[in-house]
Structures are given as structure tokens and as C-alpha cells.
Amino acid sequence: MSTFEVCRFEKQLIAACSEMMNEALRLVGCELSPKVFLVGYSPLTGFVTVIPDEHEIDTTVVEDYLRSSLGEMAPFPDDPSLTDTDWKTAFQQHDRSLWQCWQCFRDAIDSELSGRFWMVSMSPCCEVYGHVVALVATYNKVDYEKYPRLDMSILRDHGRWPSLHFGVVEAVLNKFAEELRMKDAGRRHGFETDSAREVIRVAGAFFMRTHAWFGKSFSWLDIQVRGTLDFYQACNSIAAMRYENREGFGTIIVAKRDHVAIETVIELDKPFLVTEFRRARKLLETCRGELSVLTDSRYMWGLGRIISDLHLTRNADILTVHILGQSHWRLAYRKDDLMDVLYGEPRLPQPPADLNEVKAKITNKFPSLRPGAADTLVKLVSFAVKSEHGTMVVISERAAEQAARLTKPNRGIKPFDPDEATITAASAIDGAILVDLVGKCYGIGVILDGLAGDGENSARGARYNSAVRYLQGNPDSLIVVVSEDRTVDTIN
């Protein structure tokens, strides 16, 4: 077994890749914790090296795969005397060798880990100092399948990413693989949250694009004249536009125009490009009942519906985009939500609130509650979840005292018993709703105080982190944080 050094900063590069990948996954609402390593192959010696070497990969298995499947590696054409035609031919052979090596790497590592229920993602291979190298990420298959996804046959048969979190891993690996080709690879790379967000946007756009384009036959002449279109950005723009000061709500069906499971109810005389955002937003306004806007991701041609009985394929050839309000939309396949996008930031759709879990945490936090009080408090939380805006419900035995402390003089309210209408109204303004252990409300729009400390999460919003800060000074309270997408965090 031989070792090699890609560069002086290889371990720094791997560490930065791992850190960005974990942060990007957290930002999209996923906790996979992939293990990142670098695999290298020397065509001269036939040896394979894994860096760092604590990963349980039998390199001899990888070497056997390479020897039996790869054949002789075509070198990079660095002879300056080659003609352009000869150089292009030699480079194509070299590139083909790298992809064959990639397939061997992947098959061997996947075979090694398959019995342990691990999945493998790998960057493209590149040649560095005579070695073929690639970055690899492995993660638990059971953890992966907890989040929204398509069947893996989508990747195997059609080469499309099966999920957003799969795509995030791939996008980060590809970003850092580009660095491997540089002589001082890794020297400039530290971890930056903004870079992670940019990778997420790239992954979201690519995930959307490949699925929206699948099965479509766009004219090359049309593309040359009008250019390529970014359907992901088109959805962002349409969702951001208002019509007569109204937010957009409705559904866009993405499918081939002649798909057997699509019924066109109202057909436009002449289809228009999805980049005509004002027309698209106006057409969205006509969505009522089962009617949805019809598009192939390039042109919109009318209004129609999906005929469920005829939708027999399982290759995600019909998608739906649900416009959910100002700059908020969601990509879905059948009844499964795949990606949620708010103000251009993609993330995984979050599961609906588990109110039984909220009740259990309330009961554990306050064991001396009166009979029925837990149900009353959970009902208040359910009202907050139904409202259009996110909020915080602070439950405290000292609710009256805290409301007096946190509210400006002459700006408070008299205690009252809240119902759905009052909770909805209180959720429409900034600040928390403060209730006692029987559900009586002592404050609305309350701005919580607190000092920075452990437990904060930069990937979460201001509500979540302000709740964490407040609880450090008021540990006898429990706070239910309801986000705008109606997910719930119970913090105590």
C-alpha cells in the first residue's frame, strides 16, 4: 500500500468540505452527518489510498475493481506538438478513462458499504500529480430516507437527483473537486455560511431543472433564438409578483403537452414563454378548484388538470409547483412534497406539527398542571399553527409577572381567555404570546430578552434563537416556536 500527498492542504480541504456539507444540509433542514474522505489511485503502481484512513474501506477490493475493469489509463495530453484535432481526441480518451475510474471507485466503495446500509456520493475524478483522485461522502441510508425523496431508480435509470438533500451533497463535492486541480488546493478554503447558501441555491436550481426538462423535446432552433430558461428562477419571480396587490396562490403543472394524463381545459391561442412573468402571474390568478396552469417548463399553454387514473408512470414525468403566497412555492410529485422555496432559498418540506409531542413536552415540563390544562394549551398552539404568520407561544407560571416586566408602561393588555380568532390576530404582529398554565393570555407582541449562549443555531431564524436566549434566564418556561411554514419547535 502506498500513500501519496495531493497537496500540503489536503486535510484542510477535506475538513472544509465536510464542514460546508454539514452546514448546507442543516440549512435545508436535514441532519445526515456525511463522512467525507479522499480516494486516490496510482495507475503506475495500481495502489489505492484513502485519506484520512480511518474509514473502513478495504482498498484491495477497490484495486481489484480497477484492475479488472479499468484497463490502461489514457494520460492527459500534454505534448505541445499535438494538433488541435489530435489533442481533442487524446483528451476525450483521457476524460473517458477518468469516468471509467469514477465508476470503478463508486462500484467498489458502494459494494463495500452496501451491507451496512450506507449510501455513497462521489465527485468527478481528476488527475493530480499522476494520481486519479476524487472526494467521497458516505452517509446512513436509513437517515437519508427520513426526508422527502424520489425512488433511487430515478438516479439509476435517468441520471436525475432523487432528492434535494442528495443534490446538496453532490453539489458540495463538485465544488471542492474543482479545487483539487489547483497546485495549492485547499489553501484558500475555509468554511463560509454564505458559500453554503450559494451551493444550496445551485443544488435547488439544478434539481428543479433536470426534473422539469425530463421527457421534453425542445427545439434546438427555439433554444438558439430564445436561449435557455431557468424554470427555478421563473418560479421565484412568479411567486414574488402580486396581482392587484394580491399574493399569488395556485398550482402549475409541469408536463409534456401531449401527456396522456394531462387534460387541457382552456387552451391559449398562442403559448408564451414562462419568462413573461406578468402574463404567467395573471394566468395563475385564474386557478380555481382543480384548474392549474399548464407548462412544459418552457412555454405555458393554458389551464387544465391531471387525470389521476391515467397517470400510471413512476418516473416523475409530471410535477406540480404550488404557489403558496409571497415568494413561497413548493415542488411536488403526486402527493409528495420534494422541495420548499421561500424567498429563493430552497429547503426540504418540513413534516406537519406533531401536537401529541407538544402535549407530552408540556406535561413533562409542568407535572402539576390542572386536569385538562394541557389540552387547552395544545389547542392554543394548534390555533397558532393554523394562522398565516409564525409566532411564539410562551407558557409560564409567572406569565403575569413576565408580561409586566417585558411590556412598556401603558402598552400592555388585560388578561383574557384566547380563542382561535384572538390567537390568529396576535400571531399577525411581531413578538410572543404569553400565557399561564391554564391558558390565560397576559401578553401579545411581547419582545423576549436574553443573553447569547449555548443552544443557539445560526441555521435557524430569529424566533428560535430569541426563544433559546429567553429560556436561559427563565428556565421555568416552555416556548413553542411556530414558523411561517407551520413547523413547530418546542423548547424547554
Image: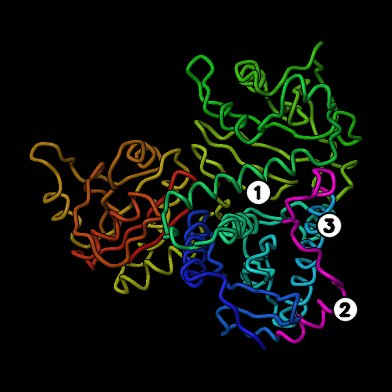
Three-letter code, disc 1: Asp
Which one is earlier in the sequence, the residue at label 1 or at label 3? Answer: 3
Residue occupying the point 51% across, 25% down: 247
Horizontal side of residue 406 vs 54, given as left or right: left
Secondary structure, mark 1, is strand
Query: Which region shows up in magenta?
Result: 59-88
Q: Which mark is residue 337?
A: 1
Q: Is residue 433 above or below residue 253?
A: below
Residue occupying the point 22% across, 60% down: 452
Q: Is residue 363 above or below residue 60?
A: above
| Closer to the camera in the image, 182 or 370 | 182
Residue occupying the point 51% across, 33% down: 327
- Check whether the beta carbons of the residues at disc 2 and disc 3 lie within 8 A of each other: no
Q: Residue furthest front?
A: 81
**Alpha carbon distance from label 2 to label 3:** 19 Å
Quarter of the figure with residue 155: bottom right
Q: Which image quarter is the N terminus in?
A: bottom right
Horizontal side of residue 338 vs 489, given as left or right: right
Label 3 crowd (10 A; few <14 / some 14-19 / many >=20): some
The residue that label 3 is drawn on is: 93
Single out the mark in the foreground, 1 or 2: 2
Residue 294: image x %, image y %?
Answer: 76, 27
**Alpha carbon distance from label 1 to label 2:** 42 Å
**Alpha carbon distance from label 1 to label 3:** 42 Å
Residue 78: within the magenta? yes
